[in-house]
Amino acid sequence: MSTVKFLLTEEEIPTHYYNIQADLTNLPPPPLHPGTRQPIGPQDLQPIFPMGLILQEVSRERFIPIPDEVRSIYQLFRPSPLHRAWRFEQRLGTKAKIFYKYEGASPAGSHKLNTAIAQAYFNAKEGVKRLTTETGAGQWGSALSMACSFFGLECKVYMVNISFQQKPYRKALMQTFGAQVTASPSTETEAGRKILKEHPDSQGSLGIAISEAIEDAAKRDDTKYSLGSVLNHVLLHQTVIGLEAKKQMDKAGEYPDIVIGSCGGGSNFAGLAFPFLQDKLKGQSLRAIAVEPSSCPTLTRGTYSYDFGDTGELTPLLPMHTLGHDFVPASIHAGGLRYHGAAPLVSQLLKDKIIEAQAYNQIEVFDAAKEFARSEGIIPAPESSHAIRAAIHEAQQGDKNGKPPIILFNLSGHGHFDMQAYDDYFAGKLTDYELPQSNIETSLRSLKEYPVPV
C-alpha cells in the first residue's frame, strides 16, 4: 500500500522556533507609537504584553528555544500528521502530488493552540492572572481558553458578533474551558459603546473586538492582552508547523514546489511557509501562496501603509497591507479571515515579491471543501478551505502546463463547529459578495494622515 500519513515521534517535536527575521534582507519598518508616531520600544508594550513575549517580538536570533513546559503540553497533539492526499488527487484527476499538514488534530481543533500555550506560559510565568483577547470564528478564543485553563489564568474573550451568532457551540467550547465570552461590539467598553451608538446593528469585526480586548486589559493591573495572529511572536510560535513538515516531507522523499496557507492576519500561513522560505532565501526554488477571501482582500487589493491594528486606534501603527482599520468585512462564514490587515512580516514578504497572494469567493471555497471532504474524510474549516481551493487551482494549472507540481498546504483546522455554514451552503443560502472598489477607497482615506513606511 502507498503511505498516507508521514508521522514523527514525540521526541521529534521541535525544540526551537524559527525566526525568519534573522534571514531577511529587508525587515519591516518599526511599529510607531500611536501618539508620538515615533518607533516604539519594549517599555511601550509592557502594559499589555509580558516581557518574555516582547523579547521574542524584537529578537533577531534565528532559533529561539521552546520552554520545556510548553513543549510538554505540545505532546498532547504534536507532532501533527502530514498526509499525502491520494484520494483527493484521484478525485481531481490530477498528476500533481498533494500533501497537507493537518493541524485540526489539536484539542482546540486548529493551529491556534501552538501560540496560545506559549503566550499563556509566558504570562503566567510573570504573575499575570487574567488574559483578554478577541476571536473571529472562535478558533483562537477556543485555543486561548484551553491554554489559560492549563496555567490557571482567567480568560475574557470578545467574539465578533456575527460569529457569536453563527457559531454558538464555539462559545460553549470556550465556556467549557472556563472563559467568559462576550459578543463584540459590547456595552462593556468605551470602544464597544461608541460603535453601537453609531451602528446599533453592527455585526462587528476583528478590529472592533481587538479594541475592546485591549481597553479591558489596560484597565486592570492583573490583566494582559493576547493576540492570535499578526505580531512577530505569534508567527514565531506557529513555525513548529513548518519545521515538522520539512522533516515529514523528507520522510516522503519529496520537497514542495508550492506551499499554501489561508491568510487572515497571517499566522497559519507563516507557520507552514516560513521554515520553507528559509530555504528559498538561500536559493531554493519555491512558491509560497497566501490565500484570502475576495470579500476581505487585504493582500490582493489592500494598500501597504502604516495603519492601526484595531478600529479604536489603541494599538501601535503597524506597517502592513491593509484595507483600513475602519473596514468592516461582509459577514462571510470564514470569520477567522475577516481582518483588515496582514502581519508586518507577511506584508514585507509580499512587498518584496518573495511570496504571492490569491483571493477566492465564498461559494467556490465551499465547493473545494466539499470535494476534499468527500475524498479525504475530513470536514475542513471554512478558513482552511481557502488553501484547498488554491491547491486545486495550482494542480489544474500544472496539469494544463504539463508540469504537475508537488503541493503542500496547511489544513489549519476542522469544521466541526462550522456545520451551520455547510448547512447554508447545501441549502443554497450562501452568496458571494463582490466588494466594490469604492468601499476600499473610503476605508483607506484615513491612511493619508499616517507616515509612509519605507
Image (spheres, helix red, strand yellow):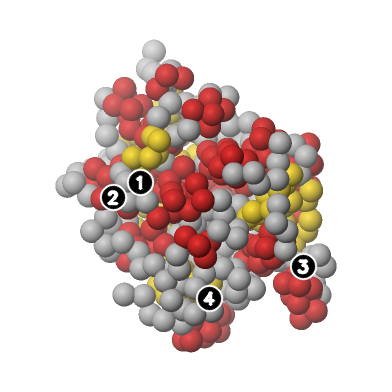
Location of residue 202 with respect to 42 vertically, above or below: below
Closer-to-camera residue (199/59): 59
Tell me which label, 3 or 1, sits earlier in the chain: 1
State which quarter of the image contains the N terminus: top left
Q: Earlier in the sequence, mark 2 or mark 3?
A: 2
Q: How many marks?
A: 4
Please state which of residues 243 and 429 is positioned toward the viewer in this rendering. Answer: 243
* Residue 34 numbered tag: 4
Mark 4 belongs to which amino acid?
A: Pro
Amino acid carrying mark 1 in the image: Asn
Image position of 77 with respect to 59: above or below: above
Which of marks 4 and 1 precedes in the sequence? 1
Q: Which mark is residue 189?
A: 3
Residue farthest top in this picture: 1
Give the amino acid type for the residue marked by disc 2 in the picture.
Ala
Which class describes the residues within 10 Å of circle 3: few (<14), some (14-19), or many (20+)? some
Disc on the earlier residue, 4 or 2: 2
- Judge whether 284 appears above or below 330 on screen: above
Instruction: Decide: is 215 above or below 105.
Output: below
On screen, residue 105 versus residue 14, left or right, reads right
Kind of element beneath mark 1: loop
- How many residues crowd around disc 2 within 10 Å: few (fewer than 14), some, or many (20 or more)? some
Residue 243 falls left or right of residue 135:
left
Q: Which residue is mark 2?
A: 22
